[in-house]
Amino acid sequence: MAIINCPVCNKRISSVATQCEFCKTDFADGIDDEKLLRKAKNKRFIQIQRLQNFSFLFVMLFATGALVMYLGITDQDETLNLSGRVMLAAGFIGYVIARVKLLMAKKK
Ligand SMILES: [Zn+2]
């Protein structure tokens, strides 16, 4: 028995293990490349989808911030306007970060 790296998640596992204890990849019928490739692709797909969800959430935050800021214009209370600005800025920055990460994930 030796310690090897799992070909999918790269964590250290036993060479005789039939399943990776971390990512639950089955090795019972041998480590077959096509299966691993599919698994890796699937993992990337999930990552891309998560990033798309994130960027959508940030767009929503941005839009909400714009709305709050608009509502705050007529309001004497400055905090509404200020919180709108903060949401607008956070939404914008978050969206840009999510988009850049998405671009990098797709390029891989
Ligand atoms: Zn693994």
Image: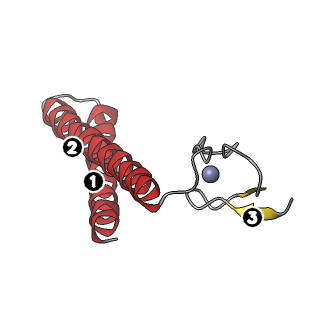
Can you tell which mark lies on residue 59? 2
* 6 left or right of 92 in image: right
Can you tell which of label 2 and label 3 is closer to the viewer? Answer: 3
Residue drawn at 69 percent across, 44 percent down:
18
Residue 89: % across, % down? 29, 52
Please say if the residues under marks 2 and 1 sit with CB atoms less than 8 Å apart: yes
Tell me the quarter of the image containing the C terminus.
bottom left
The local crowd at label 2, few if under 14, some if 14 to 19, many if 20 or more residues have their Cα within 10 Å, is some
Q: Say which residue label 1 marks.
A: 95
Please tell me which residue lies in front, 8 or 66.
8
Query: Label 3 sits on what residue type?
Result: Ile
Residue drawn at 15 percent across, 33 percent down:
67
**Sequence-first tag of 1 and 3:** 3
Q: Say which residue label 3 marks.
A: 4
Please tell me which residue lies in front, 9 or 51.
9
* 13 left or right of 28 in image: right
Query: Label 2 sits on what residue type?
Result: Val
Helix, strand or loop at mark 2:
helix
Helix, strand or loop at mark 1:
helix
Tell me the quarter of the image containing the N terminus.
bottom right
In the image, residue 76 sits, relative to residue 39, either above or below, namely above
